Image: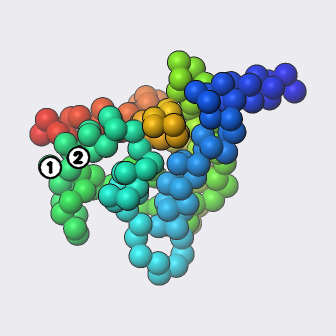
Amino acid sequence: MKTIAVVIASLIAFSGIGHASDIIAPVKEIMDATKSNWADNNSDWTDIFDASRLDHLYSRDFVAKYQAAAQFPAVDDDGISPFDYDVIVNGQDACPLEDLTTTAAPVVDRVAEVTVRFRKSTCSDAPDAKDYTTVHFLVIEEGGKPVIDDIVTENIETQARDSLKATMALIAKGQ
């Protein structure tokens, strides 16, 4: 019970944003789109980096890095994305996302880490099909609202955490 109180107090202290739901809101929008993208339906693919989302869900620094990386599009159907994989599921293939949970950690140095866990391969016969994928969204306040400043995935093979902003910086350098 004490841990919950610490988390709530930290979230309230997040630069004037008073509710955990506010901190989670930009992450929820991205995860709703990602979940829809991988659902068993025929809906159009939702670009989590389209202009309208870049404008209100991401920090200025994140947007600048994305725009620099977008100058080097990956080989894909539309030729505009710097990525040739889904940066949330951290791959090119997934099943409908299952067992999705979202939690916000206490704010540290004005950054709230929102952790999302889900199963992305449950329709597969692979040995790791039931494993969880974990994605960390680093949320800051900018312009009086919470925005995503980085998306960090956990690399299963290396046990390292991979920053999307660092990846975008490498892409922008042509690497």
Q: Is residue 108 visible?
A: yes
- Judged left or right of residue 66, residue 111 is right
22 or 39: which is nearer to us? Answer: 22
Residue ID for mark 2: 67
Q: Position of residue 78 (x, y in %)?
A: 22, 68
Q: Is residue 73 left or right of residue 40?
A: left
User: Is the residue under label 2 in contact with that under label 1 (CB below 8 Å)?
Assistant: yes
Name the foreground residue: 114 vs 23: 23
Against 19, residue 91 (above or below) is below
Residue drawn where x is 39% and y is 39% of the image: 59
Q: Where in the figure is residue 89, as x and y percent of width and height? A: 46, 52
Q: Residue furthest top?
A: 109
Neighbor class of circle 1 (other Cα within 10 Å; few <14, some 14-19, many 20+) is some
At label 2, the amino acid type is Gln
Q: Residue at x 40, y 55 (%)?
A: 53
**Residue bearing the label numbered 1:** 71
**Residue at the spot x=67%, y=55% of the render?**
99
Q: Farthest right residue?
A: 1
Nearer to the camera, 69 or 16: 16
